[in-house]
Amino acid sequence: MGMANTKTGDDTCSDHLLGLSSHNSGLRLPSNGRGRVRIPKPTKGGPVSSGPTQRDVELRAAIDEARQAAENLRRAREEGQRWQQENPPPQQPQSVRSMAEVEEFGRSKEEWSKPNTERSERLDQAKSQLLTATNKVTSLLPEDIAYEYKGKLYKRKGSSYDVKDIG
């Protein structure tokens, strides 16, 4: 279906600027109801709407979750290092004079191992939470376009992402 041949000078000019002609019969633009083509106003860039989209909300929540998981991992590592410095493992004796010493060593090693194992499990859990949060952020980030949030740029790089401070 072609454009009508009854064009004013303004219509012909706007059709020309839009790349339309009577030869371009397959293209139809929205009309304003008066037979004239409505031309959208150009934007200056930036967000299309003033509020965050659902995807923004999800991505920001994932970024916050990843930041919190990284902080939890840092704290778990620090606590583990401090605990090991304050509680070194019991030293195995080279020789004993009685079997009671062997039993005492076994008890002290077991007493030391329980909190050390719990600390190690907390560290593994913190690592797992960080990995999960990082994967979620990566999956939500756009490819090849940096996302700005809370003074940082987040840019996807394959199966991970980089973070840079702004300014």
Image (cartoon, rainbow, N blue to C red):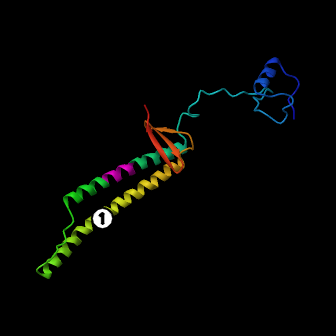
Residue drawn at (21%, 57%) of the image? 85
* Residue 33 among magenta residues: no
Is residue 119 placed above or below 154 in the rendered structure?
below
Asked if residue 71 lies in the magenta stretch, the reply is yes
Q: Main secondary structure of the magenta part?
A: helix
- Residue at (83% x, 27% y) in the render: 21
Residue at image position (27%, 64%) is 116
Q: Residue furthest right?
A: 5
Q: Residue furthest left?
A: 97
Left/right placement of residue 67 relative to residue 29 reads: left
Q: Quadrant of residue 103?
A: bottom left
Residue 105 location, x and y as percent? 18, 74
| Coordinates of residue 122 in the picture (x, y in percent) | 33, 60
Tell me which segment is drawn in magenta.
68-75
Dot 1: within a 10 Å radius of its alpha carbon, few (fewer than 14), some, or many (20 or more) residues?
Answer: few
- Image location of residue 133, percent across then percent down: 45, 52
Total of numbered circles in the picture? 1
Most extreme residue toward the top is 9
**According to the image, label 1 marks what residue?**
118
Q: Quadrant of the N terminus?
A: top right
Between 80 and 19, the one nearer to me in the picture: 80
Residue reaching furthest bottom?
Answer: 99
**In the rendered image of this protein, does residue 50 appear above or below residue 73?**
above
Residue 76 is drawn in which quadrant? bottom left
Q: Locate residue 7, reporting x and y percent.
A: 85, 22
